Image: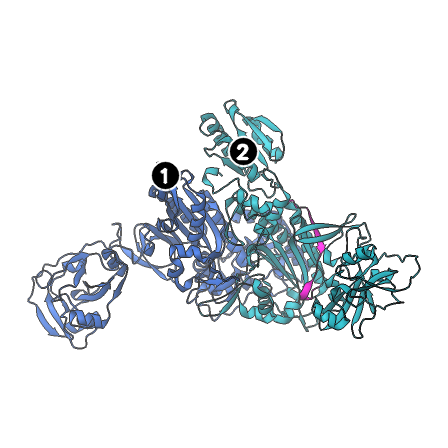
Chain colours: A cyan, B blue
């Protein structure tokens, strides 16, 4: 297309509200414009790259045998009430009333709609498994929209749902879609990891998140330096390889520790390393109080605590509740002499400690040389802490490292959560009624775009992977007022276009400097410049990222370009 | 695709809520399902045909040089307040508040959003003209959603907007998009007319509606039987070819016409044809009273009346207002002896009448032998009536006929309505600030689908035009339990698919009768049946609409199918 006929508003200044590179560059290069907080318009270049991502997603989803369909944004409240999510989803769910005062949700996700369709239409196991997907706008009223396309309120997702008569069948489809996701993100040119994730409140089984590695990611990934193991940091189990030290037990000793509040304070005051102290925190696990003990250098992982007790909720007790139960506030809690009726659980590492310090359950006092078994008893040892960098990888191969990630995909074995609540059942091969088993699978399409830019840019602008670039070739005429340049550029524009190459032709009457800067900003892989040697039929070809420029005669250009692409 | 893996829920019964064929068939054949009143999900087959229409629209819009983009559904109320439409659009505009209680409209149309983008980004005439379009979901809270996809509350539109520095430039783009629309609807296999329409309240100039001819259409089109002239019935001017009769004027005579209310009543009572009476109606045109006179067989066209007076509003006066002003109620109004200060206007036909009856402005009385000039005076004669079937076509070629139409497209020279209110201006080539001129262009994409079905079905189901059909070939195995049929069908499925032909393969273990009925219902153009002669490698080929079945050997099938497609 001719650049003079396209809406590509570029500028140099970094937008004040754009904290991260993808946001800055997509706005500066004229790919997107904000219409309201967290709500964007995709300008022509933005729409082009969006379509490239959508096409890859569609091709790979079709390969899995999934059916494309499209469900509405407007969803009757009644459906969300069937699953309880009308109340549970919270203020992220956008709601409106129609002119007859009927309540609607704006689709934040489509489990309810698809389950209502499938329960009405599918009655026999013979029609299963079935996988459907859509590429559709989603609405979520984020409290604090930010980072451009990374956390918006109206955005584009590919969501898919599968229906089965058995978990085996679900496992098959899950794996197929998992593989498709890997292919999709590879084709998008992304460096990513599939990480084990938390199945959360919906009671499903396996779930993986696809994380693009990036410093601006909001999630932390724990991954092996030597295998493909990766998990969301709160999900990684800790393999116990603790050693009991050989030192002999010293006598327990009560010491004053005035005004020492944190573990760090106490360790410095008592002049020992962090790991020679015990940390004790009082939690409310559902309705009961539980004292949780870890080594001083470890952090309690409340998801593991929640799973240990199969609890609905886990939260820290208030200082008042703590004091009432244990006799001391936050700074001086410990496992010795704790009141009856309070469970004491500890991370596995605690079992291997000797002569450690701990709070004395008396404000301003600690014990030295505390030893488990002799001075206190733990009801249950379990893996209760966050994994740390340097810990052995849970798969036994290599050591753990941390990275930040942007979640671009999520695959989830839902089980029968929705099917049960909405009465989606089939007759199985024995003629008996049986609840369906479901999976759900999402890709943040517009977010994937932003993630690509995070990984593919330099100081001059974006550097689009060939598969995603809005055009394959950027053709620049340095001076459109010179007839020879204008004529040669127009001739090349037509011949390249006719050969099926996607060309953006900068035919504007702008200075060459403006054109080069815009070209780097927009980031099309290959640039052809028609300049001073136009009269001889010679043009310059350059990769977006390379420094080398090659001069070519117009007669050999088309073949060379095809080779380069 | 294999039918066993697709969600295609078909059934025989006509759905109770579906009044028209397209609604009935799209539901029965499993193309769509209602999620809420006027809100539909497109199941896999529905999505396929939708994409075919979208692709045609996209190709032809791209050909015009328009830029594809995409704007959000959520639109800040502030934008709609700038143009006054936040109040004027009425209850059709869906509205919601976000978690911070900010007001939003759900996009019913996108003039405000695009104008806000363009006014911010385009400052010079050098960047114009510019045309952008999107294919995007629209929301309109119809009071009475009905007819399936024909009048929904959430639906898919292609909307386009053009920006110009002159009306000449607008005229060019308008014509280009007009032509593109003609191509689009031709490629969709539609019998349509581009009709002159009413530019309504927005003060634009030319506007055309693209109407698909159909008995279920809600608009009436007046078209020439001998040329391509067509207009929305209220827009067609009447060409005066009235003749004054040769009869001499008879004396005026007052007669009693007790309880004769309508023109028909009076004509019968006085024993003359309808056209020998005058009809008089009292209108309120803005704030003044106007008596409008037509021949008894003609109907007042209030849009023409409104245009004559350049009025904001035109409505019938109440019977009380009428009586107070003229001394008689509705049944006995007439032009003779009307009070000073009331304008009398008449349709051109009235000037050519002789010896006609008319109300006497005295309840229960009429005059006979009234003659204009002698008995009453008309302030202004103008074209004030609806055109009728049989009238000469306004372009001078042929006679007018009526047809019903479904509006599938609309092109509109908006002028500067939006640009003025939203401050969208540019510096022109003299360096002076100038308001932009705009056009807008819509296609109801999902409605077009329904219109196609209205024109392409028979008693057995849908009959998709080749360009729109969800698949090109429907391959049926009559009995999947027979190995020879199963094997041959699968072999053909793979060879046809590999040749790039879109095949739906009915591999279900259903009876042949069910498969044939479903196949007719779904309406794929070509059917291949693998049946009893499978062992010999012989299959049957049939067009959806033809009665002829051709037997072919598998070896010659591929070539034959390519020829048939």
User: What segment carries the magenta color?
Assistant: A189-204
At a point 50% along the width and 35% down the height, the residue shown is: A505
Within the magenta stretch, is there residue A193? yes
The image quarter containing residue A436 is bottom right
What is the CA distance from the residue labelled 2 to the residue labelled 1? 27 Å
The image quarter containing residue A366 is bottom right
In the foreground, A16 or A471: A16
Within the magenta stretch, is there residue B281? no
In the foreground, A138 or A159: A138
Disc 1 crowd, CA 10 A, few/some/many (<14, 14-19, 20+): some
> As drawn, is B341 to the left or to the right of B84?
left
- Could you tell me which chain the residue with mark 1 belongs to? B
Numbered badge on residue A295: none
Q: Is residue B528 visible?
A: no
Disc 2 crowd, CA 10 A, few/some/many (<14, 14-19, 20+): some
Q: Mark 1 highlights which residue?
A: B428
At a point 51% along the width and 70% down the height, the residue shown is: B13
Tell me if label 2 and label 1 are in contact, CB under 8 Å. no
> As drawn, is A130 to the left or to the right of A347?
left
Q: In terms of secondary structure, where does tag 2 sit? A: helix
> As drawn, is A29 to the left or to the right of A396?
left
Numbered badge on residue A516: 2
In the foreground, A297 or A450: A297
Q: Is residue A563 visible?
A: yes
- Residue A484 location (% of width, % of height): 47, 25
Q: In terms of secondary structure, where does tag 1 sit? A: loop
In the foreground, A121 or B433: B433
- Residue A314 location (% of width, % of height): 71, 67
**In which quadrant of the rendered image does the C terminus of chain A lie?**
top right
- Residue A224 location (% of width, % of height): 77, 50
- Residue B487 location (% of width, % of height): 67, 56
């Amino acid at each position: 297309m001719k650049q003079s006929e396209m809406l590509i508003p570029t500028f140099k200044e970094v937008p004040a509200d754009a904290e991260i590179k993808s946001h800055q560059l997509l706005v500066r290069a004229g790919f997107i414009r904000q219409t309201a907080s967290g709500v964007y318009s995709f300008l022509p270049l933005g729409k082009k790259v969006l379509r490239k991502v959508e096409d890859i997603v569609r091709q790979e989803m079709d390969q899995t045998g999934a059916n494309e369909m499209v469900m509405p944004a407007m969803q009757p409240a009644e459906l969300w009430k069937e699953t309880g999510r009308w109340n549970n989803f919270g203020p992220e769910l956008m709601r409106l009333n129609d002119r007859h005062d009927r309540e609607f949700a704006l689709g934040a996700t489509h489990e309810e709609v698809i389950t209502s369709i499938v329960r009405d239409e599918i009655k026999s196991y013979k029609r299963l498994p079935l996988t459907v997907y859509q590429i559709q706008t989603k609405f979520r009223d984020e409290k604090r929209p930010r980072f451009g396309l990374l956390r918006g309120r109206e955005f584009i997702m590919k969501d898919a749902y599968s229906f089965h008569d058995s978990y085996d069948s679900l496992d098959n489809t899950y794996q197929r879609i998992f593989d498709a996701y890997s292919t999709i993100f590879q084709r998008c040119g992304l460096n990513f990891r599939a990480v084990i994730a938390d199945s959360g409140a919906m009671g499903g089984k396996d779930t993986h998140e696809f994380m693009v590695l990036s410093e601006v990611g909001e999630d932390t990934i724990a991954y092996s330096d030597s295998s493909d193991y990766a998990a969301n940091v709160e999900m990684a189990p800790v393999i116990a390889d603790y050693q009991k030290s050989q030192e002999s037990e010293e006598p327990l000793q009560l010491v004053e520790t005035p005004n020492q509040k944190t573990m760090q304070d106490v360790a410095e005051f008592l002049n020992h390393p962090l790991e020679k102290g015990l940390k004790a925190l009082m939690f409310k696990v559902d309705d009961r109080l539980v004292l949780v003990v870890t080594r001083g250098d470890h952090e309690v992982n409340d998801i593991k605590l929640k799973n240990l007790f199969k609890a609905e909720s886990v939260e820290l007790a208030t200082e008042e509740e703590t004091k009432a139960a244990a006799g001391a506030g936050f700074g001086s809690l410990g496992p010795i002499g704790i009141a009856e009726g309070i469970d004491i659980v500890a991370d596995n590492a605690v079992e291997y400690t000797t002569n450690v310090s701990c709070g004395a359950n008396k404000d301003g006092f600690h014990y030295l040389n505390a030893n488990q078994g002799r001075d206190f008893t733990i009801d249950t040892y379990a893996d209760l802490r966050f994994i740390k960098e340097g810990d052995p990888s849970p798969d036994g191969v290599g050591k753990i490292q941390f990275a930040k990630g942007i979640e671009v995909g999520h695959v989830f074995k839902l089980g029968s959560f929705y099917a049960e609540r909405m009465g989606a059942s089939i007759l199985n091969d024995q003629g008996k009624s049986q609840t369906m088993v479901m999976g759900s699978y999402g890709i943040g399409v517009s977010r994937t775009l932003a993630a690509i830019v995070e990984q593919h840019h330099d100081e001059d602008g974006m550097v689009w992977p060939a598969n995603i670039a809005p055009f394959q070739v950027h053709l620049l005429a340095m001076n459109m007022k010179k007839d020879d340049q204008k004529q040669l550029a127009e001739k090349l524009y037509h011949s390249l276009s006719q050969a099926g190459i996607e060309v953006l032709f900068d035919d504007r009457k702008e200075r060459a400097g403006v054109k080069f800067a815009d070209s780097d900003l927009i980031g099309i892989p290959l640039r052809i410049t028609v300049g001073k040697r136009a009269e001889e039929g010679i043009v310059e070809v350059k990769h977006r990222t390379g420094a080398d420029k090659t001069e070519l005669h117009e007669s050999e250009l088309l073949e060379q370009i095809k080779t380069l692409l």
